[in-house]
């Protein structure tokens, strides 16, 4: 990595992001997943979101072949699941649920069931746009799991105005 890339990575890491796990069922019915922090909403009409993944990611190749995936926004209590799907050697589906060809994380702050809408090149990454088919989450969310300067971080919920 050249010095500009190193500096860019250090400085862009100062932008706090949420943490999500993307899951899909591969052709062989195994679950493929990855932890992402480059996820954002795109459109309200139609409902679209996007996330980015490295071009050479084996998980991304399987996910794109599945054409359907879930995006699960994690709370602090699910940091262990984020770590699991950030590591290529551990793909246990403990804490996951499946139905109708989708797999998602139980207890996530929000879950979006999506179909691949578009894939765009983005340098050494792919930009994957998903059309949201269904979404759900708990009435009360957990404290959000954040990523900041290369580390997990938290954010306490602000007190509600009286």
Image: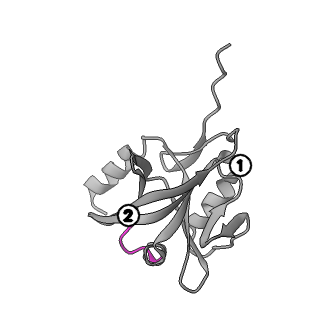
- What is the number of the mark on residue 5? none
Q: Secondary structure at mark 2?
A: strand
Residue appearing at x 38%, y 64% in the figure = 117
Residue 31 screen position, x and y as percent: 60, 75
Please determine whether, in this image, residue 41 is positioned above or below residue 64: above
Quadrant housing residue 162: top right
Out of 136 and 58, give the one closest to the viewer.
136
Tell me the residue that label 2 is attached to. Answer: 117
The quadrant in which the N terminus is found is bottom left
Q: Secondary structure at mark 1?
A: helix
Residue 38 screen position, x and y as percent: 43, 53
For marks 1 and 2 on the same chain, the one whose residue lies earlier in the sequence: 1
Residue 73 visible here: no
Out of 160 and 145, give the one closest to the viewer.
160
Chief secondary structure of the magenta span?
Answer: loop
Residue appearing at x 64%, y 30% in the figure = 157
Label 1, label 2: how far apart the Cα atoms are? 31 Å
- What is the number of the mark on residue 77? 1
* Magenta stretch bounds: 54-58
Out of 74 and 103, give the one closest to the viewer.
103
User: Is residue 43 toward the left or the right of residue 143 in the image?
Assistant: left
Residue appearing at x 59%, y 66% in the figure = 85
Quadrant housing residue 145: top right
Q: How many marks?
A: 2
Please determine whether, in this image, residue 72 is positioned above or below residue 121: above
């Amino acid at each position: 990595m050249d010095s500009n890339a190193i500096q860019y990575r250090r400085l862009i890491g100062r932008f706090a992001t949420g943490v999500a796990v993307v899951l899909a069922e591969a052709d062989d019915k195994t679950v493929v997943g990855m932890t992402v922090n480059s996820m954002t909403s795109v459109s309200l009409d139609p409902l679209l979101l996007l996330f980015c993944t490295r071009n050479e990611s084996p998980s991304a190749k399987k996910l794109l072949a599945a054409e359907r995936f879930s995006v699960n926004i994690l709370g602090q209590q699910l940091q262990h699941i984020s770590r699991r799907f950030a590591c290529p050697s551990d793909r246990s589906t403990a804490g996951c649920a499946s139905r109708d060809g989708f797999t998602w994380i139980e207890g996530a702050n929000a879950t979006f069931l999506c179909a691949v809408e578009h894939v765009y090149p983005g340098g050494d990454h792919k930009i994957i746009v998903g059309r949201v088919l269904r979404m759900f989450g708990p009435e009360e969310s957990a404290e959000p799991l954040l990523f900041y300067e290369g580390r997990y971080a938290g954010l306490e919920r602000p007190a509600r105005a009286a």
